[in-house]
Image: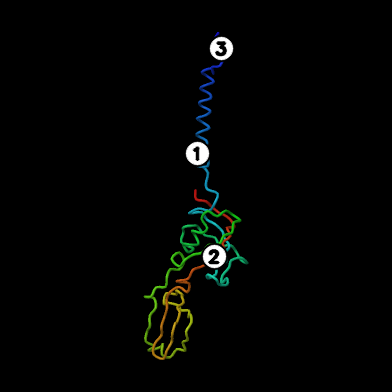
Amino acid sequence: MSTSQGNRIPKTGLALLFVSALLLATCVLFAGCTTAPAGAQLNDTVKVHYNVSLQGGQTFESSQNGTPVEFTIGSGKMIRGFEKGVIGMVPGETKQVIIPPEDAYGPVNGSLIQTIPRTGQLATMDLKPGYIQYTTKDGQTGQVLLRNVTATTITVDENHPLAGKTLVFNITLVEIVKKPS
């Protein structure tokens, strides 16, 4: 027997080593690919609390003292920037999201601002600048801004009150209720 044969690995041992290395490489390569991401993702149903303010302003709306808001990310129930801000968050996480008008209520649309004559029933109404509520014939409710009221005209703005505004949200992800199957 030569000394070089004493240093050789038997064929079965070499095959076992090769298979083990291959399995280890496969596990490393695919690690984490079969599990769902830990953070909130598109189509997840989540519960959140939030505070919202205008840039540099006071909070004007909050869910903190009430029930968390539940929605499905991507459903369009919330403004686009809010939904984008929740993606990747984990339960218990709080973050600030600054949302430009394009991802909130859009820019001010000039075609939704009209000056109309103050005639007929409008001539007799006691109107002042500010928001007024209305109900349509089919029961829909809404509000419009009377920007200017004179004896002969009324300037009406039908834009959303937050159109053209940058919003600052502080969002806390309370729970990921359901992930899509």
Q: Give residue 169's mark.
A: 2
| Dot 1 or dot 2, earlier in sequence | 1
Camera-nearest residue between 153 and 170: 170
* 3 or 2: mark nearer the eye: 3
Tell me the quadrant of the picture where the N terminus can be found: top right
The residue located at (61%, 56%) in the rendering is 92
Q: Residue 45: give x, y in percent of width and height.
A: 52, 56
| Dot 1 or dot 3, earlier in sequence | 3
Camera-nearest residue between 177 and 10: 10
The residue located at (41%, 77%) in the rendering is 137
The secondary structure type at the circle numbered 3 is: helix
| Dot 3 or dot 2, earlier in sequence | 3
Q: What type is the residue that disc 3 sits on?
A: Thr
- Indicate whether 18 appears above or below 10: below
Q: Residues within 10 Å of mark 3 (few under 14, many from 20)?
A: few
* Quadrant hosting residue 156: bottom left
Give me the C-alpha separation between circle 1 and circle 3: 42 Å
Q: Give residue 147's mark.
A: none
Q: Residues within 10 Å of mark 1 (few under 14, many from 20)?
A: few
Give me the C-alpha separation between circle 3 and circle 2: 75 Å
Q: What type is the residue that disc 2 sits on?
A: Phe
The secondary structure type at the circle numbered 1 is: helix
* Quadrant hosting residue 63: bottom right
Q: Give residue 30's mark.
A: 1
Q: Residues within 10 Å of mark 2 (few under 14, many from 20)?
A: many
Camera-nearest residue between 20 and 71: 20
